[in-house]
Image: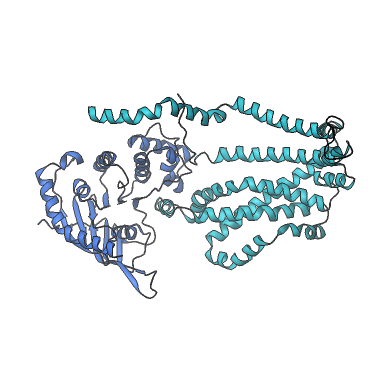
């Protein structure tokens, strides 16, 4: 088993002994612990995927990393400094629709620059470049409802990348897409990432996606009280093509190994979701 | 893949069959032919006026309800007389002062009411404690039959335009307020979180996220609001004033001059339609981003 050794350099993102408890809505006084005592560290330029059964608190962990959610206990460090408020060094790609429906593609992409006070001409120029980089030149004036689901994800990707974040947080960004579009997007993500290596924390429930994209896969236990139960280094060569790499023997080997560790937790999570 | 082809053929054939095409053109016909639609509208309008003329012109048809042939004319007016009134008003110029006053009241009530509704809607939606405190009062004020306030406003603000504007504002405010409040509450939490992650400050969230969402909801209320602003102005005038179309109608009713009453109503209707048209134009300009119902093109 190839359990990862903690990286030597200062991590880009460090979640230390994070616990998140929510007060229960049905029964006052009781609380539900979504995440318990979880430590996770991501090196600069490292692509880490977190997989786990549904409802195990993966998104909670990501929201803590983004600074959108205060953990009940534990600390977050970003590039060596403790995190206060919103994580300004990170971009976040959401699972659900996150584009502003009242802005066209170009205005959505340049939103971050506009918030930062960049001049209109320059931000328009840069947003146009990013749109063509994600294959959407000619769609600048389209509103989100005039774009397909895959196109909207591309716009969201460009919207995040234009700010050149040190850390990319991605919450099942492609889970709503059909399988072909999804694989295209995964390849595009890898291409963009290889050109300018940032730290990525990628949340998914799809083990194949996790292995195909990542340097390291972290497996979470079923909730409540989710915690990591295994870390696996993915030593597949880069650059990768997500379609082709799935067929290589090493991929199958890794998949079997990780799936074996995950299976019990998936079944546990499934049983819990049925009980509720 | 011959099998898939055969399948898709089987699905396509009934849709493009003559039956379906005929049905589709029938559904599309009036909307996609503005010229013909206009013709039908004109015919319908002409028919209504023709019927009115036929029923009220003395001696044209034998009397079947009233004993006196001029009685129908007395109760329902006559289109020819009504148009003569309107013509004289606009050519003689006596209407402009009254119409100007009514329109000024309407536009002021609309603008002030909308602005106040927008401000209060945003404020209460973004401040939970203020909204909890104000909630019962807002509900009570909205439930209150506010037409009853018009005479009180006349006492407080006199018989000039102020009392009408204030009355119109009370009508417009609540419509816009509730819609804006709802609009802010309905902002997608994901869009909001995304804007925060992109670095939006509190002020920028208000301007770039809450305000666009609130105005889109607010706009759906503006058609009702412009109508209510008109109601406010005319009812206010009707209850006590020395100027305005409502005043003209009130004066004419006092002497049973039905033709003038109907002429006033027609003029008001036309201007209400014009205001509504302007709102629609502004709405279409500002809300291009809203998904409409997709319609395929006929080949």
Kindly indicate which chain is depicted in cyan in the rendered structure. B
Residue shown at the point (40%, 26%) measured from the top left: B17
Q: Residue furthest bottom?
A: A29
Task: Please say whether residue A5 is visible from this viewpoint.
Answer: no
Residue A147: percent from left, percent from top: 40, 38
Q: Nearer the viewer, residue B35 or B289?
A: B35
Residue B267: percent from left, percent from top: 77, 38
Q: Nearer the viewer, residue B297 or A101?
A: B297
Residue shown at the point (66%, 30%) measured from the top left: B41
Residue shown at the point (71%, 58%) measured from the top left: B146
| Residue A170 position (above or below residue B84) | below
Residue B156: percent from left, percent from top: 80, 60
Residue B31 as seen in the image, left or right of residue A218: right
Kindly indicate which chain is depicted in blue in the rendered structure. A
Q: Nearer the viewer, residue A259 or A217?
A: A259
Residue B10: percent from left, percent from top: 32, 29
Residue shown at the point (11%, 56%) measured from the top left: A2
Q: Nearer the viewer, residue A245 or A31?
A: A31
| Residue B62 position (above or below residue A145) | above
The answer to which image quadrant residue B21 occupies is: top left
The answer to which image quadrant residue B284 occupies is: top right
């Amino acid at each position: 088993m190839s359990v990862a050794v903690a990286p030597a350099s200062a991590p880009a993102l460090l979640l230390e002994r994070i616990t998140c408890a929510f007060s229960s809505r049905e029964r006052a006084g009781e609380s539900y612990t979504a995440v318990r005592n979880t430590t996770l560290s991501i090196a600069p330029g490292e692509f880490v995927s977190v997989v786990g059964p549904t409802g195990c608190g993966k998104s909670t962990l990501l929201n803590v990393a983004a600074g959108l959610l205060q953990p009940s206990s534990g600390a977050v460090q970003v590039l060596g400094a403790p995190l206060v408020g919103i994580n300004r060094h990170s971009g976040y790609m959401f699972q659900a629709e996150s584009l502003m429906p009242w802005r066209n593609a170009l205005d959505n992409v340049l939103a971050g620059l506009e918030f930062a006070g960049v001049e209109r001409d320059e931000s328009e120029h840069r947003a146009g470049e990013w749109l063509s980089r994600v294959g959407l030149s000619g769609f600048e004036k389209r509103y989100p409802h005039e774009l397909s689901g895959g196109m909207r994800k591309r716009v969201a990707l460009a919207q995040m990348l234009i700010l050149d974040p040190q850390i990319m947080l991605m919450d099942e960004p492609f889970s709503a897409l059909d399988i072909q579009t999804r694989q295209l997007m995964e390849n595009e993500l890898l291409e963009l990432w290889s050109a300018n290596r940032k730290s990525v924390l990628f949340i998914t429930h799809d083990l194949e996606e996790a292995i195909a994209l990542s340097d390291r896969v972290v497996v979470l236990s079923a909730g409540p009280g989710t915690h990591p139960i295994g870390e696996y280094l993915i030593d597949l060569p880069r650059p990768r093509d997500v379609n082709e790499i799935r067929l290589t023997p090493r991929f199958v080997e890794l998949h079997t190994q990780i799936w074996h560790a995950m299976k019990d937790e998936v079944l546990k999570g499934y049983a819990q979701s049925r009980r509720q | 893949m011959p099998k898939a082809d055969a399948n898709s053929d089987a699905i396509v054939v009934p849709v493009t069959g003559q039956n379906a095409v005929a049905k589709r053109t029938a559904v599309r016909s009036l909307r996609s032919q503005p010229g013909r639609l206009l013709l039908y509208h004109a015919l319908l309008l002409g028919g209504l006026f023709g019927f009115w003329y036929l029923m009220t012109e003395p001696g044209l048809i034998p009397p079947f309800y009233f004993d006196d042939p001029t009685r129908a004319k007395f109760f329902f007016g006559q289109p020819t007389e009504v148009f003569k009134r309107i013509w004289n008003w606009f050519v003689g110029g006596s209407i402009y002062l009254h119409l100007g006053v009514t329109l000024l009241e309407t536009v002021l009530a609309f603008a002030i009411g909308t602005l106040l509704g927008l401000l209060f809607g945003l404020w209460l939606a973004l401040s939970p404690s203020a909204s909890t405190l104000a909630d019962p009062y807002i509900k009570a004020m909205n439930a209150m039959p506010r037409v009853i306030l018009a005479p009180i406003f006349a006492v407080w603000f006199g018989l000039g335009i102020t009392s009408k504007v204030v009355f119109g504002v009370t009508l417009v405010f609540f419509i816009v307020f509730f819609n804006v409040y709802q609009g802010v509450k309905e902002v997608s939490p994901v869009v909001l979180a995304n804007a925060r992650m992109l670095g939006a400050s509190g002020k920028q969230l208000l301007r770039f996220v809450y305000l666009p969402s609130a105005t889109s909801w607010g706009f759906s209320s503006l058609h009702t609001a412009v109508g209510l602003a008109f109601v406010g102005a005319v009812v206010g005038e009707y209850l006590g004033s020395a100027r305005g179309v409502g005043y003209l109608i009130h004066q004419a009713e006092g002497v049973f001059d039905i033709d003038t009453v109907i002429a006033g109503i027609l003029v008001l209707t036309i201007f209400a339609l014009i205001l509504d048209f302007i709102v629609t134009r502004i709405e279409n300009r500002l809300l291009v981003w809203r998904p409409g119902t997709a319609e395929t093109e006929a080949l």
